[in-house]
Image (cartoon, grey):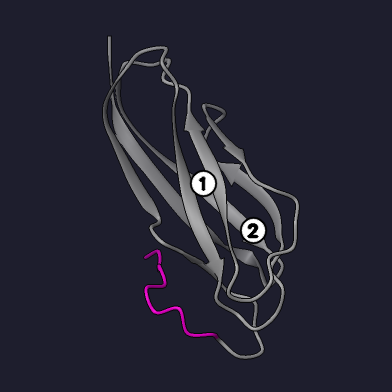
Amino acid sequence: MVKTFKNRSIIKNKTIIGFDTSFYDFGTIEKNKPVAKYFVYTNVGEKPLQINNVSSTCGCTITSLSDKIILPRKKDSILVKYDAKKIGKFSKTVFIYYNSNKSNPFQLKIKGFVKD
């Protein structure tokens, strides 16, 4: 289960990433028309946050993020793009590795349906 943090209280002595939402449904989209979604996150921990790596379940999902340190209670975003080349349903996962949780990444999920 993927957790989101609605309560923005600070978490002591840790670096914790909290997303406003961890799932997005693009609905029905057209083939060969890429779509994108910004996932907004907050450092809800007490220590600075740095995202070390982002990976996905396929090459059709592209991510974009800044290479900066996020101080406690500050926000930033990760752009997730889906290249809609195949017709049919899709469901993809993006893994967010950050400085406090290198072995258990946070997961963002997208889904939708590509029509011709």
Going 59% across and 55% down the picture, which residue do you hit? Answer: 96
- Placement of the C terminus among the 4 image quadrants: top left
Amino acid on which the number 2 mark rests in the picture: Tyr
Residue 38 in the image: state x and y as whole percent. Answer: 48, 44
The one nearer the camera, 4 or 86, is 4
Going 56% across and 47% down the picture, which residue do you hit? Answer: 78
Q: Is residue 97 visible?
A: yes
Q: Main secondary structure of the magenta part?
A: loop
63 relative to 17, above or below: above
At label 2, counting other C-alpha atoms closer than 10 Å, the crowd grade (few under 14, some 14-19, many 20 or more) is: many
Residue 4 colored in magenta in the image: yes
The one nearer the camera, 103 or 64, is 64
- Are the residues flagged by discs 1 and 2 in contact, CB closer than 8 Å? no
At label 1, counting other C-alpha atoms closer than 10 Å, the crowd grade (few under 14, some 14-19, many 20 or more) is: many
Residue 49 in the image: state x and y as whole percent. Answer: 69, 68
Single out the residue that lies furthest toward the bottom: 12
Q: Which residue is mark 2?
A: 97
> Range of the magenta residues?
1-10
Going 54% across and 67% down the picture, which residue do you hit? Answer: 42
Amino acid on which the number 1 mark rests in the picture: Val
**Seen in the image, is 67 located left or right of residue 64?**
right
Q: How many badges with numbers are in the image? A: 2
Give the image quarter of residue 2.
bottom left
85 relative to 1, above or below: above
31 relative to 7, above or below: above
**Seen in the image, is 13 located left or right of residue 87?**
right
